[in-house]
Amino acid sequence: MMTAQMNRVSLRSLEMATGSLNKVCLIGNLGTDPQIRRTTNGKLAAILNVMTSDYWRPGTARVQWHRVVIFNERLAEFAERQLKKGSKIYVEGTLETRKWFGKDGKSETWTSEVIVSGFHGRLIILDDVEPRDELLADDTDMSPAPPAPPSPSNQPDAVDSGLHRFLAD
C-alpha cells in the first residue's frame, strides 16, 4: 500500500512539474531504405518506414508501420550512410499529427509521424554490424570519432555488443 501511494505521488509530481509528455519509443525493422529529402528551407531530412510487431499467441502477430521523420541534418546523413532495408533500430522522438488538403482543395488527409529533431530524439542501430563511423549530431566536423582507449569501463558487455548509439541532441 505504501509503495502504491508513493508511486501515485511521484507520478502526480511529475505531471505537475512537466505538464505533459509527448515521447515515442520504437524498436523495429526498416521496411525500405531511408528516403532522403530536402525541406523547403534546404535542410536535409530522412524518412524511415519502421515495422513493429506484437506477438500475443504463438504464430499470431499484429504488424504496425510507423513513419519516422528525422529533421536533424547530421542524423539524416548518418541514416543515409548506415541504414538499409531490414536494419533493426531503436528510435525515440515525439508524435506529431498534421493534415493537408488535396489538389481539389476540399479533401482532407491526416497523418501521424514520429519526429526526431533537435533535443527530442535518438537513433540506435541494434544490428550486430560494424559501424563505418560514429556520428554525434552535435559534432562540428564529419570525421569519424577516434577509437576510445581500451579500459574495463568502456569494454562492451554481451548485452551492448550490438548497440551503436547516436543521439539527435
Image: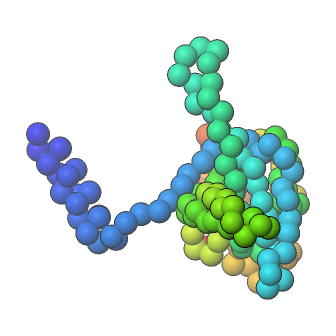
Answer above or below: position of 86 versus 102: above
Judging depth in this view, the residue of 37 and 30 nearest the camera is 37
| Corner quadrant of residue 18 | bottom left
Q: So how many labels did they put on this image?
A: 0
Judging depth in this view, the residue of 53 and 84 nearest the camera is 53
Judging depth in this view, the residue of 64 and 104 nearest the camera is 104
Drawn side of residue 81 relative to residue 59, left or right = right
| Corner quadrant of residue 111 | bottom right
Look at 47% across and 62% down and name the residue there.
Answer: 22
Q: Position of residue 158 (x, y in %)?
A: 64, 38
Q: Position of residue 28 (x, y in %)?
A: 68, 42
Q: Is residue 15 visible?
A: yes
Answer above or below: position of 74 versus 151: below
Q: Is residue 70 visible?
A: no
Look at 22% across and 60% down and name the residue there.
Answer: 12
Quarter of the N terminus within the rendering: top left
Look at 65% across and 62% down and name the residue there.
Answer: 108
Look at 29% across and 72% down and name the residue there.
Answer: 17
Q: Position of residue 40 (x, y in %)?
A: 80, 81
Q: Position of residue 161 (x, y in %)?
A: 69, 44
